[in-house]
Amino acid sequence: MIEIGKKAPDFTLADQDGKVHTLSDYVGSYVLIYFYPKDDTPGCTKEACAIRDDYSVFEKAGIVVFGISKDTSASHKKFAEKYNLPFTLLADTDRKVITAYDAVKEIFGVSGTKRISYLIGPDGKIVKVYPKVDPSEHAQEILADFAALKKEKK
């Protein structure tokens, strides 16, 4: 797990529409990166839909949202369309970003992806880590922590 205060590892990945995103292009904004195991599975769908349902609050707060899994852009596109997901899903098919963010999980000898999230500050440093995520509560947890963080900075 990357520690709070450390620089977030930069990356470049394609989204569900094939558009390429580089993390360093978002310096100056808060960025939520949430890692999830697989498109269109029960827990991952619950988490994505919870973020979708509160997405207007994320937007209003100026938080860019990236969901990352090892699924392909085509898989992400189907998932995003099926559930009307308004945020960006990034394809890490070679798992380099998953590895860089310590989101690798071994499941019965098979390499999977942890459900872990990072909130990155405008300076590109990690401001909050979520190593244990409850898919249905996660969006609200992030927004509450963000509100507290903004209060601290005043």
Image: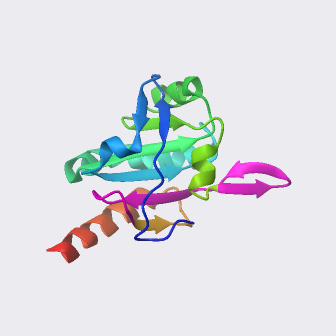
Does residue 107 show up?
yes
Depth check, front residue: 139 or 96:
96
Q: Is residue 117 magenta?
A: yes
Question: Which quadrant would the N terminus be assigned to in this image?
Answer: bottom right
Give me the residue at 47% from left, 33% from top: 83
Give me the residue at 40% from left, 48% from top: 51
The answer to whether residue 109 is above or below residue 125 is above
Q: Position of residue 50 (x, y in %)?
A: 43, 49
- State how many labels appear: 0
Q: Position of residue 133 (x, y in %)?
A: 54, 62
Give me the residue at 55% from left, 66% from top: 131
Left or right of residue 71, residue 124 in this image: left
Residue 19: name its quadrant: top left
Residue at far left of view? 154
The answer to whether residue 131 is above or below residue 90 is below
Residue 132: name its quadrant: bottom right
Q: Position of residue 124 (x, y in %)?
A: 35, 57
The answer to whether residue 13 is above or below residue 81 is below
Which residues make up the magenta segment? 104-126
Specify the principal SS of the magenta part: strand
Depth check, front residue: 106 or 5:
5
Give me the residue at 47% from left, 30% from top: 15
Residue at far right of view? 109
Does residue 84 show up?
no
Left or right of residue 46, residue 26 in this image: left
Residue at far bottom of view? 152
Visual colour scheme: rainbow
Question: Which quadrant would the C terminus be assigned to in this image?
Answer: bottom left
Q: Is residue 154 magenta?
A: no
Q: Position of residue 41 (x, y in %)?
A: 63, 41
Depth check, front residue: 108 or 121:
121
The answer to whether residue 102 is above or below residue 40 is below
